[in-house]
Amino acid sequence: MQSGKIKHYNSDKGYGFIDVDEQSEDVFFHVSNVRLSQPITVGQRVYFNSERNHKDQLRATEVTDASLSIEESSAKVNHASIRSNQSHQSGSQRLSDVNSRNDTSNSNRQNKKSWKSTALSVLILIAIIFFGYTELKPALLGDAPSNTTSASSYVETETSAITGDPQIDQTIVLIQQGGPFPYPNKDGTTFYNRESRLPAQSQGYYREYTVPTPGVSHRGARRIVTGGNPPTVYYLTIDHYDSFQKLQVN
């Protein structure tokens, strides 16, 4: 399954978009394909399968979350272990009936073998659960910069006041000088303007960049969207694309 975060959700119309990890193209989803343990919220981490429709658009066929994935995986492992133990015990019982006339020593050896097999099954089950959690742990901790090298290359520089907000002004400077950006796999990717809140332009005209939010460990809800290459127009959204404000940038 792929993973990402809810980027936008229209509760009245029952659809939204997922910001996919390590992928610039967002994925459309409908509420009918969502199986989450909590109500849908922007910034919520999800896991999903997707496919392209006849218009070559990516659509999620199933959306779930990490807790459901772990519960279902554990249930399947437990069910398989129980069936394995039941099958083994049934075989042991039949073998015991056939060899009921054997001496006490043979019976003790058989019981010892059964105990070892059961203990081995329990150890295998514990190993599966542990390693499954280890694989999912980074995703459960939330969004973070893609790697240590990229994160360490992002350095704040002194900027002249443009809007008066240090993070917004810093992001504008990084855009004008071409980086380095705090989220190199996300910053500079195409903004598709699917809700048509910005003037209609050809695909690839708009690009989006993360504006860090103090005190927030993930990307937050603030973005700068530029138009043109090089940029000739700048828009700011502080509510995850629900509204935009045009910036005066020289």
Image: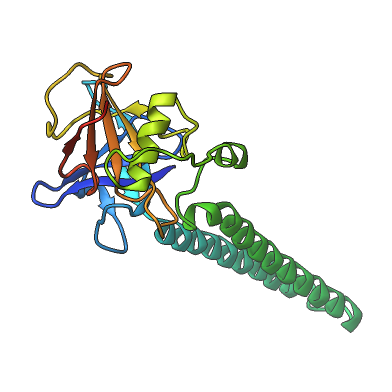
Query: From the viewer's perspective, is residue 139 above or below residue 55?
Result: below
Which of these two is toward me, 199 or 94? 199
* Most distant residue in the bottom direction: 104
Q: Position of residue 220 (x, y in %)?
A: 35, 51
The quadrant of the picture occupied by the C terminus is top left
Query: Left or right of 67: which side holds 93?
Result: right
Which corner quadrant of the image does residue 110 belong to? bottom right
Q: What residue do we see at 26% from left, 42% from top?
A: 163
> Is residue 143 visible to the viewer in this orientation of the structure?
yes
Query: From the viewer's perspective, is residue 218 above or below residue 188?
Result: below
Q: What residue do we see at 16% from left, 19% from top?
A: 201
Query: From the viewer's perspective, is residue 20 above or below residue 141?
Result: above
* Most distant residue in the front direction: 160
Q: Position of residue 30 (x, y in %)?
A: 20, 44
Query: Left or right of 86: which side holds 8?
Result: left
Q: What residue do we see at 88% from left, 83% from top?
A: 104
Which of these two is toward me, 102 or 164? 164
Q: Position of residue 157 (x, y in %)?
A: 49, 39
Query: Left or right of 174: which side holds 233?
Result: left
Please count the marks in the image. Answer: 0
Which corner quadrant of the image does residue 152 belong to? top right
Which corner quadrant of the image does residue 108 belong to? bottom right
> Is residue 59 visible to the viewer in this orientation of the structure?
no
Colouring convention used in this rendered image of the protein: rainbow
The quadrant of the picture occupied by the N terminus is top left
Q: Position of residue 209 (x, y in %)?
A: 35, 35
Q: What residue do we see at 57% from left, 67% from top?
A: 82
